[in-house]
Image: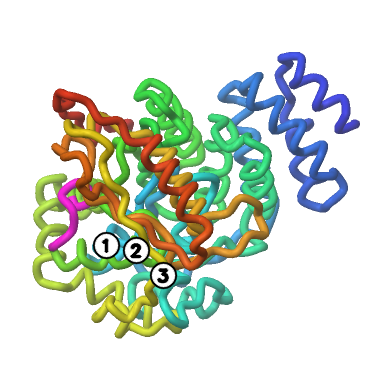
Amino acid sequence: MRMYDIIKKKRDGGELSAEEIRFFIEGYTRGEIPDYQAAALCMAIFYRDMTLRETTDLTIAVRDSGERPDFSSIKGIRMDKHSTGGVGDKTSLVVMPIVASLGAKVAKMSGRGLGHTGGTVDKLESIKGFRTELDECEFVDIVNKTGIAIVGQSRELAPADKKLYALRDVTATVDSMPLIASSIMGKKLAADDDCIVLDVKTGSGSFMKTVEDSRKLAQIMVSIGKAVGKKIMALITDMDRPLGFAIGNSLEVIEAVETLRGHGPDDLTEVCVALASNMLCLGGSGTLEECENAVKGAIADGSALAALEAMVEAQGGDPEWIRNTSLFPKAEFSREVCAAENGYIVSVDTEGLGTASLMLGAGRNTKDDKIDHSAGIILIKKTGDRVRRGQTIARLYTNDRGRLDAAEEKLLESTHIGAKAPQSRPLIFAKVE
């Protein structure tokens, strides 16, 4: 079997066999297949797509590419949530402490930023001392003691995905439905959680730009999960505008903390309550209404915030930074961005706003780039808001003054002002079960 023939077959629209897919994944994981051939196959998949059978086989090959962790000593129902990626999407920092405070066990392995989207691991590493690499024994011990631990994907867990994840980020093959589905579900199935809720984003800031495509991706992933016996469902949520006001690592952590205090943005709070409620309901904690009441109660009484503090301390971080978010370092340079005309913000190119944040240093252009944790954007005005010419609509933050001009230009280019207010758009479009 030759990699050349596999690339050519997919390039020409053929359906790859399970053996061919496994040959690719195993060879690439071992380093026997070079990046340029893997990139060629990813591009062929991007253009030619995959059948559900191919995508399932790819997912299983990714799952089996490394060691499977043994979490049998974790006491309780293990739950996970995964987002397909968005701008300002800090839901894991809110949802996971909520469900942990209500008795679920969260043993979560998260990724870093990919393209214009942020990564949970990058955000957590903006907290002083926080460790995102733990050995399995310590990881399990923290989950049993605090109910929650969030770490980066280990080298042993689905290593094929880790290599492909970084490669896709720099070869413009991120937004391929089979590659997204196999990446997400390969890791989720390797971690072997009991209940999985998928947050499938739709809109200009997501990899799936339409509700129809998002529904299709959700159906693929739910089908894969059910085929291997998992309790799984998906919510399709809006990413035609950033979630919350903060875009960037430490800025998003601060906003997540405020949300757990009950003072978060309405849109972020609504999505987080829905995700947490559905996770608990899926795990058998009650009806959806009962679970929603419990979620709101965990925010109101401070137990959800306490769960976040406990996790931060257990993973070496300074919990005082959660209690007093003014301790997060501030970027050296900032700039106010002003509206160029009167009217309403009728829409934004959310991916463009994510790119502007990346340009400020909050993301990566290559897999080896360093993150500026204090860089990013605070939106002052959002879609539907009325603005006046010269009024501040956003603030930019960076530690490199030379990045400001291009980021400001990108933000203005991505913000569309018109004479009439836009029609309202739901935050949650559908549930896929």
Q: Is residue 223 left or right of residue 134?
A: left
State the residue at coordinates (26%, 41%).
339
Where is residue 415? Give x, y as percent: 32, 36
State the residue at coordinates (28%, 62%).
256
Where is residue 94? Give x, y as percent: 28, 60
Tag 2 secondary structure: helix
Q: Residues within 10 Å of mark 2 (few under 14, many from 20)?
A: many
177 in magenta: no
Q: In the image, which disc is placed on residue 331?
A: 3
The amino acid type found where label 3 is placed reads Ala
The quarter of the picture where residue 172 lies is top right
The amino acid type found where label 1 is placed reads Glu
**Badge 2 vs badge 1, beta-carbon distance below 8 Å:** yes
Where is residue 125? Give x, y as percent: 47, 71
Q: In the image, which disc is placed on residue 251?
A: 2
Q: How far apart are marks 2 and 3 (CA)?
A: 10 Å
Q: Name the residue under label 1.
A: 255
State the residue at coordinates (50%, 50%).
188
Magenta residues (range) = 263-269
